[in-house]
Amino acid sequence: MVIQWYPGHMARAKKEMIASLKLVDMVIELSDARIPYSSRNPDIDGLAAGKIRMIILNKADTAEEKITSKWLEYYKEKGIPALAIDSRNSGSKKKIMEAIMKAAEIKFERDRKKGILKRPVRVMVCGIPNVGKSTLINTIAGKASAKVGNKPGVTKGNQWIRLNEKVELLDTPGLLWPKFEDQTVGSNLAFIGSINDEILSRYDLSISLVERLKAYPGKINERYGVDESVPSADIIKAIGEAKLLLKKGGEVDEEKACRMLIDDFRSGKLGRISLESPDKGDSNVSEETGV
Ligand SMILES: Nc1nc2c(ncn2[C@@H]2O[C@H](COP(=O)(O)OP(=O)(O)OP(=O)(O)O)[C@@H](O)[C@H]2O)c(=O)[nH]1
Ligand SMILES: [Mg+2]
């Protein structure tokens, strides 16, 4: 299965993002803590050059804490402020606001020197689809200002949200890039729900996910009570049998079994799983930018 998804609305969103970048001081890029490398759009480094930067490893509740800490250490070494959070949790608000105000200090200082006292820091929140950008903004705002949903492409256009006299946030639509050179990146993005499911084979995706979950022996067994030592195709069937996902004639509904497995991974019900680590020698860290 070859995965590519760069619909026309994304090319338009990119243009809109480039136009809005002129208006912002800071760019907060959300990535998914389970795949911090694959979930970062390689275009953003270039587009956001010269801006104050911050990286958020979102959905940290679904990733292994030990590996997320290694990623935070990795960004610390690069000198890029990074945070790991569950953006649905209102407790994250304080942590994010403190990080924004700390990172923005340089801008406020610059303004003060110019005699500008009342200009807020303008912050663009960007990242791939479905990574939690709008959820994060709602949590910080303390109300449902931006539309959220568990599928890619929920936010259709840029939307400003004024938090207070010091901070304004810009919600943006999820952005991918025209070609995934490495198909592991493509499937990682599909696992977390950043690719439109309609263009994917759920069956092929589930087989790849079962293969990847071999790094976490016991997770599938714990959740569905099935034997993990059999071939991947039989694991899918066994999940359908165990969960009574049957068609009319009593045959296993594999489509439903695949959907359950993928949804359970996406929501973290399979447990904390990290698919990428920053350990040295891992091919999943960009040689070019080192980020
Ligand atoms: N487990 C978990 N789920 C989250 C977290 N943040 C967001 N979600 C869920 O992820 C889904 C997508 O959230 P959105 O905020 O709509 O994502 P988005 O990045 O704005 O998506 P687009 O606008 O489509 O690009 C929703 O079902 C959220 O509840 C998190 O930190 N942890
Ligand atoms: Mg959104």
Image (cartoon, helix red, strand yellow):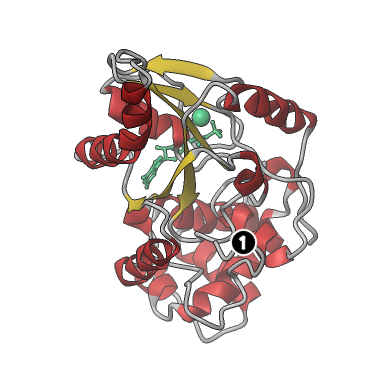
**Vertical order, 179 against 212 (above or below):** above
Q: Is residue 138 left or right of residue 183?
A: left
Q: Is residue 253 visible?
A: no
| Residue ID at (45%, 75%) | 226
Residue 66 image-quadrant placement: bottom left
Q: Nearer the viewer, residue 40 or 287?
A: 287
Residue 118 image-quadrant placement: top left
For the N terminus, the image quarter is: bottom right
Q: Please, what is the three-letter code of the amino acid marked with disc 1?
A: Thr
Q: Nearer the viewer, residue 109 or 187?
A: 109
Crowd class of label 1 (few under 14; some 14 to 19; many from 20; radius 10 Å) = few
Q: Nearer the viewer, residue 200 or 255?
A: 200
The location of residue 35, given as percent across then percent down, is 51, 61
The location of residue 62, given as percent across then percent down, is 37, 57
Q: Is residue 191 visible?
A: yes
Q: Is mark 1 within 8 Å of ligand 1?
A: no
For the C terminus, the image quarter is: bottom right
Q: Is residue 262 left or right of residue 90?
A: right
Query: Which secondary structure lies at badge 1?
Result: loop
**Vertical order, 7 against 274 (above or below):** above
| Residue ID at (79%, 30%) | 8
What residue occupies the far bottom of the structure in this picture?
229
The location of residue 179, given as percent across then percent down, is 79, 52
User: Which residue in the protein does label 1 denote?
Assistant: 289
The location of residue 96, given as percent across then percent down, is 28, 39
Q: Quadrant of ligand 1?
A: top left
Q: Nearer the viewer, residue 100 or 212?
A: 100
**Vertical order, 61 against 104 (above or below):** below
| Residue ID at (41%, 65%) | 71
